Image (cartoon, helix red, strand yellow):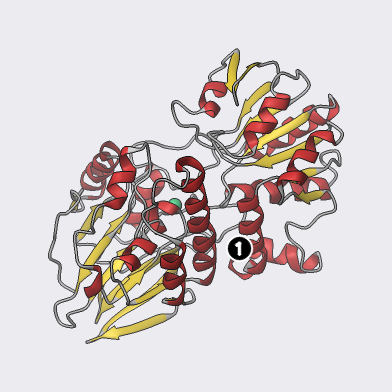
Amino acid sequence: MTGANFLLTDGPSDLKIVIDCGLFQGDRAFDEKNREPFPYDPKTIDYLFITHAHLDHVGRIPKLVKDGFRGVIYSTAPTKEIAEIALLDSLNLFRKENGEDVEPFFNKDNLNLAMTLWQTVEYHETVNLKEGLRVTLKDAGHILGSTMYEFARGDHRLVFTGDLGNSPSPLLRDTEILTNTNYLVMESVYGDRNHEDRSQRRNILEDTIEDTMRSGGTLMIPAFSIERTQEILFEIENMMEESRIPLAPVFLDSPMGIEVTAVYKKYSKFLNDEVRAEIEQGGDKIFHFPQLHETMSTDESKAIFQANPKKIILAGSGMSTGGRIIHHEKNYLSDPKSTLLLVGYQQVGSLGRMLQEGARTVKILGEEIPIRAKIVSIHGYSAHKDSDHLLQFVDSTKDTIKKVFVAMGEPKSAMFLAQRLRDYLGINAKCPEAGETDEIEL
Ligand SMILES: [Zn+2]
């Protein structure tokens, strides 16, 4: 499900190409998996193509370099910049959790060397590799800079999707439609289920802000640093501008969230037409409104508690498993005027999930906290296509498709989607096992 990593070996050119080099994510057992040697010799790899900057797609890049990779890394510019932020963050997090005694599986030098091998390309740009093999970038609409890679020779086409966006998104362009693809290696995170209705999500956000501000409490929003934080900030910015909610200070209390938001600002040309039109009208401003305070340092973060309780705080981690949000939760979850707003998936066992399921008390930083704050969940914020939309995505190219490889999802999601592709579209679809090899004609 995590640790995306595909090897494409091209006969005519003898090229060895890797697509994504992700981290295995989960409990501690995964740390061992990330340390294992790659099932191929990194020294022999010519190219590494990166679909997007989530850690399960970029987390082992420095290890690939450590193990001898010296080829060229390609991605869009925002992917490169967000990946560097995410990789540094993962290194810091490792240090925090393990102290100085345990060596992480890569170091800062490996990361720096990876960055020097990394070149950026634009959407729709074609890179000619060798012996007629070429690769073109297409917008996946998942997070800023996310890309599908179309490898082609003559008119044979193979596409690696990476993760596919839940279009339409408030900020991004829609996932590009494929029409002449022959082979597809696609994600299936939500292969077996559909998202809840999302037409209400903006209303719930608006109502929750209004209610909490009216009662004079604090609104806490735990959010992932990439994409979700920017989506919520963008919605709040618009609502304040249109006077749909009361003006109140908004604290972006996440160093990584602040850094990633800066990349979104820098690469606003990657955002959808509507947002870009809005930026142009507003004098080139996005994520930049008088109420927004970016609190980078720990001291600034601590000072938020001293500010008037009528405020909004966005902080990581998204499932309250760590990060600055838990300090705010410790301060405000016992306050009946305050609200915790959950805008993302909460994994079983996480503090966020316990709160979502109505826990009466929780233990935070060694202290038993009675829950008197309101807990509100908004569903429908997802960065992935659901089952119906994954099916629709393949349907547009079903006339040319020869085979679909369903990967990057839990086995039951992947198998369910493959079955749907066979039953509904009559397509040859399979779920490859890790380490499995297939031969195709390109
Ligand atoms: Zn992703």
Where 116 sits versus 391, above or below? below
Where 143 sits versus 129, above or below? above
Q: Is mark 1 within 8 Å of ligand 1?
A: no
Residue 296 % position (x, y): 71, 51
Residue at left 64%, top 36%? 325
Q: Nearer the viewer, residue 141 or 315?
A: 315
Q: Nearer the viewer, residue 200 or 283?
A: 283
Q: Is residue 440 left or right of residue 329?
A: left
Residue 13 % position (x, y): 19, 83
Where 47 sits versus 169, above or below? below
Q: What residue sits right under mark 1 in the picture?
A: 272
Residue 441 % position (x, y): 15, 71
In the image, what residue type sits under mark 1? Asn
Q: How many marks?
A: 1
Q: Is residue 404 left or right of residue 437?
A: right
Q: Quadrant of residue 409?
A: top left
Could you tell me which quadrant the N terminus lies in? top left
Residue at left 40%, top 52%? 104
> Can residue 390 be spotted in the picture?
yes
- Could you tell me which secondary element the residue under label 1 belongs to? loop
Where 408 sits versus 398, above or below? above
Q: Is residue 58 left or right of residue 238?
A: left
Residue at left 33%, top 66%? 66
Q: Is disc 1 surrounded by few (<14), some (14 to 19) or many (20+) residues within 10 Å?
A: some
Q: Is residue 200 left or right of residue 237?
A: left
Residue 383 % position (x, y): 50, 48
> Can residue 399 be spotted in the picture?
no
